[in-house]
Image (tube, helix red, strand yellow):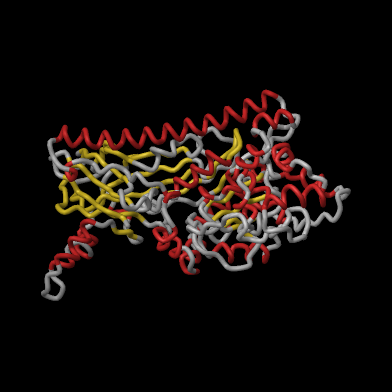
Amino acid sequence: MNNCGSDSDDNDDDYVELANDGDTDMSIGQSRLQCLFCRNQASVDLDDLINKHLPAAHGIANFASLLVSIGVQDQPTWVQFVAFVRSKNFNATTTEDGRLQQLLDEFRVTAGAVQDGSGDNTIPSAPVGDIDDPLMYEVDIEELLQSQGLHATADLRAAGKSNSNSQAIDKDQRIVELELQVESLKTQIVSMSTVLRRFALGGNSDDVIPAASSRTIAELKDDEDGYYVDSYSGASIHAEMLQDRIRTGGYHDFIAGNPLLFNERVVMDVGCGTGILSMFAARAGAAKVLAVDCAEVIARAKEAAAENGLENRISFYRGKLEQLDELKVGVKVDAIVSEWMGYCLLYEGMLESVLYARDHCLKPGGAVYPRICNLLLCGIDSEELYQRNALYFDNVYGVRVSFLKERCLSEPHVAYDLQSDWVATSSALVCSIDMLTASAYTSAKVESVPVQLTALRDCKLHAIVGYFDVDFLGNGDAGVNVSFSTGPLSQVTHWGQTVFYLRSPISLSSGQVLEFHVSILPPHDSPRSLLVEFDWSNGTRSEFRMD
């Protein structure tokens, strides 16, 4: 599934789309500003709106203090507040209209701008709308607070918040800052370690394991990620995934079989696609489901939810999760479900987005499903498969086509017809990802992991095969567990198996152990792709790239 931004259908207020990130300068005075609390079109001058209209029409003498009192203390919470009010289509006609205070109270509690008495943050009661409102961008919250001599944390205390709560806010902000510093240091360490390996080995950049991509999925621009997004906008790929009984049936059986894990819970579906997992969760009793995706198919998902009578239980958000401020500010969920796995588990880089959702949106004690994902390798012996693919281009009706053979030997092949009797070795675990504890920095990278494959019989290895297993609950968790495998000994899935053909087949005797190291890293130029390298004990290397 996918989770990256692109354009959406116009005039569609049932799901969110990111605003244009262009260079347009919307300075004060260029847009007519509509009051937040009534339908009067105020002066184009922002000062008039705040200092004249709000006091006269609504009795709001100090707009900055009001914002801080409800928890609006930075630009993201301001954007959330504007979107929240607009979604209510609010219109207070007099200063005595009590609905205004009710609206402010609802935002304070419901939107999670500040914590309520239980200490939990809850979600907005309606999807955010009208994301292009000029007020979102023409009000600089920090400048507004400073103009009134206010500071967010100090004024929160004046508004009745306890000193401990203010300290907690400061502490949380400091934690975020420190985490960003740690991630920056880790990136520097990777770069330095690459240089050191080059010197140690006395070679050039081709002699060492390529460093992982320094770019993240969130940093990809729309035009850079367009191919990936578009690949999930058509109907055929979603039909193929829905028809995968192992995949879709596995998710259905787990969610439907564990209503206690979903009943009255708030659930986030990362990379929702057609919304099938969101609808499973809603039918299992979820109080609210937040469905996030970037592709055009999310509009069809919204239609499917309405078709099944679930439109009031599922809110759809379109755009990169990492950039949707209305979800990462004040939104906390009880569980995250996602079908993020790609070929060879890590292809397409969606793991990064799911772990981002975990780190920014999941409540303490929350769950991520599936919980455990394991990447494995095994060896196969199939002269038939090798001849059909790797050797075919040596003689195409008497013509040699070497460049296609080279491509076959340097690009993995996704196979759906591997025979169980071709499996010639044991399987080796390359990495195991616990979605609750995995590091967002290291989990999507496999670097120089030792592998041992034991021959099950006398054989000639023609290829190494990559596949993954999934365990929804993990060991020790309560509930009805579901697991499945995409390996060559299991029923075929839409993921198939990823085949890495060897340039020279390897002969093994029964019981003999083949030892090598594997690295699986995103390349510098494409964080959704993979570089796969096998370093053999004789000093040679096999290299593959998945794009």
Residue 109 shows in this picture: no
Q: Is residue 186 above or below residue 216?
A: above
Name the residue rendered at 56%, 32% in the picture.
173
Q: Measured from the top left, where is residue 28 in percent x and y?
A: 61, 54
Left or right of 374, for residue 354:
right
Viewer-proximal residue, 25 or 99? 25
Q: Measured from the top left, where is residue 346 in percent x and y?
A: 38, 48
Q: How many marks?
A: 0
Q: Measured from the top left, where is residue 109 in percent x and y?
A: 74, 40
Name the residue rendered at 48%, 58% in the picture.
22
Viewer-proximal residue, 368 or 297? 297
Name the residue rendered at 53%, 41% in the picture.
358
Viewer-proximal residue, 303 or 94? 94
Left or right of 3, for residue 509:
left
Left or right of 190, for residue 113:
right
Residue 325 shows in this picture: yes
Q: Is residue 274 above or below residue 196?
A: below
Which image quarter: residue 306?
bottom right
Viewer-proximal residue, 234 or 112? 112
Q: Is residue 75 above or below residue 387?
A: above
Name the residue rendered at 22%, 56% in the picture.
410
Q: Measured from the top left, where is residue 192 in percent x and y?
A: 27, 34
Q: Quadrant of the C terminus?
A: bottom left
Q: Is residue 89 above or below residue 428?
A: below
Which residue is outermost to the top?
164
Which residue is outermost to the right?
96
Which image quarter: residue 194?
top left
Which image quarter: residue 318?
bottom right
